[in-house]
Amino acid sequence: MKLSRQFTVFGSAIFCVVIFSLYLMLDRGHLDYPRGPRREGSFPQGQLSILQEKIDHLERLLAENNEIISNIRDSVINLSESVEDGPKGSPGNGSQGSAHLLSPQSALQADPKDCLFAPLSGSQHPDVQMLDVYDLIPFDNPDGGVWKQGFDIKYEADEWDSEPLQVFVVPHSHNDPGWLKTFNDYFRDKTQYIFNNMVLKLKEDSSRKFMWSEISYLSKWWDIIDIPKKEAVKSLLQSGQLEIVTGGWVMPDEATAHYFALIDQLIEGHQWLEKNLGVKPRSGWAIDPFGHSPTMAYLLKLAGFSHMLIQRVHYSVKKHFSLQKSLEFFWRQNWDLGSATDILCHMMPFYSYDIPHTCGPDPKICCQFDFKRLPGGRYGCPWGVPPEAISPGNVQSRAQMLLDQYRKKSKLFRTKVLLAPLGDDFRFSEYTEWDLQYRNYEQLFNYMNSQPHLKVKIQFGTLSDYFDALEKAAAAEKKSGHSLFPVLSGDFFTYADRDDHYWSGYFTSRPFYKRMDRIMESRLRAAEILYYLALKQAQKYKISKFLSSPHYTTLTEARRNLGLFQHHDAITGTSKDWVVVDYGTRLFQSLNFLEKIIGDSAFLLILKDKKLYQSQLSDTFLEMDMKQSSQDSLPKKTIIQLSAKEPRYLVVYNPFEQERESVVSIFANSAAVQVLSDSGKPVDVQIGAVWSDPRTISQAAYEVSFLAHVPPLGMKVYKILESQSASSHKADYFLYNDGVAENGIFQMKNMVDAGDAITIENPFLALWFDRSGLMEKVRTKEDGKLHEIKVQFLWYGTTNKRDKSGAYLFLPDGQGQPYVSLRPPFVRVARGRVYSEVTCFFEHVSHKVRLYNVPGIEGQSMEVSNIVDIRNVHNREIAMRISSKINTQNRFYTDLNGFQIQPRRTMSKLPLQANVYPMSTMSYIQDAEHRLTLLAAQSLGTASLASGQIEVFMDRRLMQDDNRGLGQGVHDNKITANLFRILLEKRSGVNMEEEQKSPVSYPSLLSHLTSSFLNHPFLPMILNVKLSSPAVELLNELSLLQSSLPCDIHLVNLRTMQSKMGKGYSDEAALILHRKGFDCQFSSRGMGLSCSTTQGKMSVPKLFNKFAVESLTPSSLSLMHSPPDAQNLSEVTLSPMEISTFRIRLR
């Protein structure tokens, strides 16, 4: 009773505070409007509108206040309820964690003007919206004749009389940086010869052209060739005979890659080109990624490109676009209300990028013009008619035959300019192929160009030659101010190349490495930021030991290894087993190097006396508390050895741009532990058991968990000692469906006949689980409502038809079947002061749901971690499904590349596998009342196959090849960790009808921040240096930013740039910022966040702490271009969704 009286007092106090603040806000309401000079005659009108604005403003403030008051009231009611009775079935643990609610919480303040973006951005109307295209297409796949997936193309003989057909034949060679062979093996066996022959063969005739895309290969070759060869390449580039297209490190996958890595590999390629060749690519070339993302179009636009080309698009979409003549279009971002993001895109119309499918609609004929397939060679034409070498005797008939294909193909486009690619995988590696292709085509060209009646002008060209001619032709045909090309918005997933063969398997294939990729990105970003700032300190204090270290070299290598892994056969999981090991080994080695860079840089930054860095003998000053022992094993925690005499120091680094409170868990060799904060005060600690297997407690280690509060991009030092008098709180354990061997120091309760539900709770949520340890219900304490949210696991098999699932394809044998275990799984429940969790152990997955008893962001969602092991199954895929009562109406939402949200529709006219989409960081479902979001720390396939459901595919083991060239199944499965968060949010003020039509959607700020926490966790590091020598002192706390950045601005990277000469670093870094679009229609309950939104404005001098900004100038995304009027900025302004790169110099 006493407690509930305290709550009443507490509630009244807060009520008074709110009323007082309301008074202050009303007062503020009078000051918020500009007192500009009034125009004569507009006096009353102006006054009225200002008055109207004030009234609106006050109404808004009142509404916000009402919400705050009702939140407080609900919290008080919930608190008193939970104190009085505790949730049913929880063993007397009701009030645990509720004390934390009393800590003051800053409610998140979004500027009302920042809330206008999300509702407005849905109102644009492009000519083509991909969501509508899917409604229109029947997906019936009739036989189209020679162009099997298309239709019969007809033309009239006189169509080119007024304007001849202009054909650009574009020779190219598609070089996968790893697929059936490793990157190095392909280079050794094929790619180096392509380059060597290119230099010789292009010099023979200035009309010959060639183009290249993958800089990873070009740089490898550049390192081993002599100066005359280098000069030859430069002159070929200058003359326009050779063109570099896209110029990224690789041609990346666009479904499973995160935008951080997409940008990074683009910068790596473009920086290399600028330094070594002085060229700036301007056309994008993506012929092999398995589906295409608008994120990539946006990044190319930001890099200064004006055109791009794509190829792998669903065959029904290609047919539809061909019929409409809309294969060339301006690709515009979903949120763009103007045309700032438009980039001209060419979609190739036919099945493949090889020669049989690029000259025209009939592969049987086009194959006869691939002169590598002449009789006597290693390759033939599968259509049965081989090529003929061109001679004066047959040139007329062969030219007519080829021209007929070109003319038919040109009927699918709006101008008389035609692109005819000439190439395939690893082509032009043999000297003879250069001669066969170029000499035969030269004879065909000479004949065609010499016959005026054929009305054709044909030549070799590069991609930009084609686009330049296209733009010239389009400008001439521009009708009454309207562009010749339609505007399109949306994406091109999920790809199918024939029949019901949807490429949704690779969204999940080799998930172990998809997770490793995300860890690598987070580590690389942390290393980049710390390295640049430490470098500035090392220069200031002349610390040669740091300046002469190999850090910049290993950092560059890490960028390149991560870049290589973004290749469309790497992160996709579609390479041979040993190639996967090669990629994994590169990532693993770079992870180790990055940990060294992070440790050394952080140590230098947090040392009080920087000069002491020079004299430290230790090889590793700060060591990560997680270690991965090999490229295919899960990371394990280091056990910190404590003693009473010698304290150990833990430096916690927050790689996020916001001040942040999160739980840190470390392993120590003693349970008698005291943790002291930077001010020397003891911190609340929870001691948990470390389990060597589900039922056995380790005697060598204990888990120590505490709440760390760290400034933005900052570090804090915690002191850890062994102390028998420490008042640490031990977690209590409750075991279901099976006993435990020994309990050591912990309270273990065997729940043999407990009929009650299994529950855990924190200040925000109470969860109920069934006897198998799977979640069933959630109560949100804010409003006391109970929600049915069930978690279950499913198996998918593969079809019994001839074509089965493999690395690329998902061809299921029907709906997923519930995962059934023969006996109830062992369930282990832990309840404690810092967190509570339920873990259940099935044969193929151990599944853990954890609630953190903390205020703010970390406490408002459920952390789900699954350890999946399907190494003993055949042709099975395992998925996790979350079911709710949300009325989804066949709609759900997935992110693209962690950058933007794409609305999806689950369609009954499509097979199950077509309704599976890629998810990089989140997918969600919603109705007018609620949104349920699944946030992910790795890319996987996701679907919503029935109302109220989200499911995610976690691993797949397939025993056969799916006939896409890989030549093997997927059976190198590892024990794989998947990490998620489930967030349930209450929505308000939603117009469902509008929403159904809208092509855009945005996460809430809470969702964005939760996702960032998940992908950029705290990095705890153990100090290896003895601090007993009095000289070595650390700063207690270090903030590298003056204050948190605005809530919606993310610091993507701070990337030290290479020097113009030599191998090292320069004085400059690239500062990349992204302003996120967010939706305000969510309750803004106390999020425990110390940031606000500022309409995208940031003051530059106030950015960094301890560092002065010497200069900050705008640049294009990958630093290739500077705007003509680029000046030193003192304020940065970003629009919602915008990514901007700046050149920055600190001192």
Image (cartoon, helix red, strand yellow):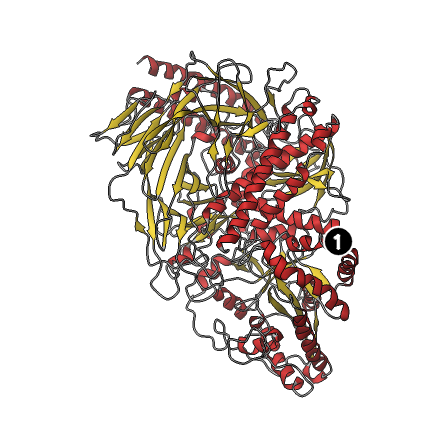
The kind of residue tagged 1 is Leu
Residue 245 place in picture, x, y as percent: 67, 58
Q: Is residue 1076 visible?
A: no
Answer with left or right where residue 179 lies relative to residue 473. left
Q: Is residue 1045 above or below residue 993?
A: above
In this view, which residue lies farthest toward the bottom?
393
Left or right of 877, for residue 575: right
Q: Position of residue 912 (x, y in %)?
A: 38, 57
Measured along the vertical axis of the image, is residue 1040 above or below residue 253? Answer: above
Which is nearer the eye, 707 or 877?
877
In which image quadrant can residue 99 be found? top left
Q: Is residue 1078 visible?
A: yes
Quadrant for the N terminus, please.
top left
In-front residue for pair 605/712:
605
Q: Secondary structure at mark 1?
A: loop
Residue 1082 figure quarter: top left
Residue pictured at 24% horizontal, 44% vertical: 822
Say which residue appears at 39% left-offset and 19% top-offset: 729
Q: Nearer the viewer, residue 617 or 421?
A: 617
Q: How many numbered discs?
A: 1
Please name the residue that numbered disc 1 is placed on.
277
